[in-house]
Image (cartoon, coloured by chain):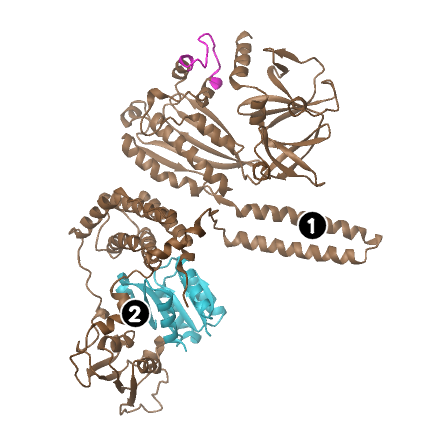
Amino acid sequence: MATILAVDDTASMRQMVAYTLRSAGHEVIEAVDGQEALDKARETPVDLVLSDVNMPVMDGIALVRALRELVQYRFTPILMLTTESDSEKKQEGRQAGATGWLVKPFNPEQLLAIIKKVID
Amino acid sequence: MAIDLTQFHPVFFEESLEGLEAMEAALLALDPDAVDQATINELFRAAHSIKGGSGTFGFAAVADFTHGVETLLEQVRSGKRRFSVALVEVLLQAVDCTRQMIRQLQRKNTAPIPELATTRQRLDALLASADVAVVTPEPAPGERQPPSVTPAACAGWQIEFVPGPTILRTGNDPLRLFRELATLGDLKVKLNPVELPSIKTFDPESLCLGWTLTLDSPCDAAQVAEVFDWVAQESHLRITPRTASPAQSATDSDATPDLAAAAGKPEQTEKPEKAEKAEKAEKGEPGSIRVGIRKVDDFVDMVGELAITQSMLCELGNDFTLDKLPRLLQGLESLAQNTRELQAAALAMRMLPMGFVFNRFTRLVHDLGQTTGKKVRLNLLGEGTELDKLVMEKINDPLGHLIRNAIDHGIEQPQVRRQAGKPETGTVTLNAFHQGGNIIIQVQDDGVGLDCEKIRTKAIERGLLAASDSPGQGQLIDLIFHPGFSTAAQVSDISGRGVGMDVVRCNIQALNGSVDVSSVAGQGVTFSIRLPLTLAMLEGQLVRLGSQVFVLPLMSVVESLRAVSGPLRRVAGDFDVVSIAGEYVPVVRLCELFQIAPDSQGVVDTVLVVVEGDNVKAAILVDDVLTQQPVVIKSLEAHYRKVEGIGGATILGDGSVALILDVAGLLQLAGIRRDLFSRINANKEHAA
């Protein structure tokens, strides 16, 4: 099982994601914005990052860029949680180095399916 | 594994309501001509979160409605639309509607919301308006349809895949893609002939390979393309059918629960019936509180210290000898210290900054200004002052009432103000600060002030005052709190809905607080509400009567006196009064009220504790005044039933139970009425 960093400023979404991942047996670290995520990722190595895009302090795109700067996260899968209205954000995220995206709204099953795809 | 999403609903509701509040505050504060990007981002983020959450948790109607709001804000954010007064008004309406929708979901109420349809129309009208440079958002460059794929499905697919050299650095691994493809059918992977760079220029982090894949599967092209969705943009990808089979129907792919389908239409992910299941869980919900991490950290720190003290005492107790006494005393002292700090830290968790309540009134003031045609500004001070969450919730309505009154009756029309030499815009100031163990909340306006003549006329009309009485200004003003004084002549839809100032005072007294008013003609009125910081504890004055110990809230104690030697005077046939500093104060004999045998039979040897409740002073006769200490309030109603004159109970250091006296209730029980004594003292002043 993997250690996953779940980043979202919206508590309900973050809790839903974290709960779903934990019930699938993963270790979950939660963060409320990009900066906190970056700090926590530096402290504890994680296998996968799931991040919201629109967040205060440091948004998801900036987080991806910052993580890719760190040698230990150069190849780590980073998935953006976007909504359809963020279609430009998907590509912006990709340019910044994100692995892929998961489009909101999604349900726990969809989340787990995509996680399974990225880590085995 | 099925995950019950309803468990996240309460959090979602709460954060959405908070988000809406933030949106409302930002909208009210912004100047349409000069909006800063930070405000727009904040507005967008709030709308975006609500939309995202409502979609995820299956509230399709909310998601659908907020989608319009989000789109408008997105247009503003990307510079395609400019803020206007009209846009702000529509957004405010939309915030109101969304709030109602969320509240209804919270309460499992399905009544239609009348404003929804019109707000929706206004939103749609704005969305359709040409006030926007690019009306239809063009698909982003990367959003092109999957590359050159024939729509028809077939028995298998040939896939040319040459990923971009940087693919590895985005965390994408071609092997993962192949594994995923293999789940669709039988996959053959063939490496394309490739010329590798020389070892000198070789970059191990770049990918310079390409593959030809053969997938033997009846799946359709979209499914294959979806596998490459994340990498399609920077890769060369060609998907061609191996053997055409036009019989393939589209329904096959529809039946597959793939992500593309979910992305294509924001489908409800949860069925509404599921929401009903949560009903039981929601009933009698005690409410939750958000506590800053620092407060929790402090608390945890103190628990840590307590544990250290505990282990130290435990060790001492194991083999105690008398020479360890100083250490024992020291340990007990730290224990006392830890307990005090822990108590303070626990109470601090219930505390919220006053800004929470104050900011709610920005909207009220904005709206009232519009309806009355007056120009009003709300000035907030002391927003960081903290108050118990429960007290805060209960003070909301009285504050709202005072603000309505201030704008309705206090602040003048702009031209009247100009004539009076005041600025056209009136100011309502809300202020909060700590004083002793209390919080003082002031509602201040710079309007006309109270009209004492009018109050006098009205009081005489209602028989609250005899025509011959000439009370002082303070007593006159105090009459506005009298039940039945509601200024019916001035009923409007803003204030004066039959809810008078007496209700305001009652509500505040129910919180063990008091309210004072001062007014300067032409300069405005100030209401000062004094409240205990928490309902969980109070600073108590312990008094003894016979064998019983009672607690008086220190807040209501004015002074304590050794009983005067002179006899008490009996007035109005019913009361003893004592003259203190030239004022007649009624005497309450607790021993008679509660039928307790006192130590001292006469008045001599007793102590008079002068208390004030409901703006009436009274002297309570007790045997002795003991210490002052903070006491934890235990509800009597919860454990027994409501008793007139008793506010609650507490457990003292020796384990005995002491009743906490409710001064206002006690005076009522003793039959002491405010009007009677204010009249006695007024006449006396008059006579003097």
Judging by the rendered image, the residue that carries numbered circle 1 is B335
Q: Residue at x 29, y 45 (%)?
A: B97
Q: Which quadrant of the view contains residue A72?
A: bottom left
Three-letter code, disc 1:
Leu
Residue B32 seen in render: no
Q: Position of residue B521 (x, y in %)?
A: 40, 20
What secondary structure do most residues of the magenta stretch adopt?
loop
Which residues, given as a range, are shown in magenta? B459-475
Describe residue B113's horizontal placement relative to residue B324 as left or right.
left
Residue contact at pointers 1 and 2, CB within 8 angstroms: no
Q: Label 2, on which residue?
A: B259
- The answer to if B471 sits in the magenta stretch is yes
Q: Secondary structure at mark 2?
A: helix
Question: Which residue appears at 35% of the width and 58% of the height?
Answer: B57
Where is residue B545? Give x, y as percent: 70, 27
Residue B32 is one of the magenta-drawn residues: no
| Mark 1 vs mark 2, CA separation in Å | 59 Å
Q: Earlier in the sequence, mark 1 or mark 2?
A: 2
Q: Are marks 1 and 2 on the same chain?
A: yes
Quick check: B292 above or below B371?
below
Determine crowd level at label 1: few under 14, some 14-19, many 20+ residues with C-alpha closer than 10 A.
Answer: some
Q: Closest to the observer: B443 or B3?
A: B3
Q: Residue B613: where, in percent of width, then height? A: 56, 26
Judged by depth in the image, the label closer to the viewer, 1 or 2, is 2
Chain letter matching colour cyan: A
Q: Chain of mark 2?
A: B
> Regarding mark 1 in the picture, which secondary structure is present there?
helix
Q: Which mark is residue B292?
A: none
* Quarter assignment of residue B656: top right
Amino acid type indicated by mark 2? Leu
Q: Which chain is brown?
A: B
- Say which residue appears at 28% left-offset and 81% top-offset: B163
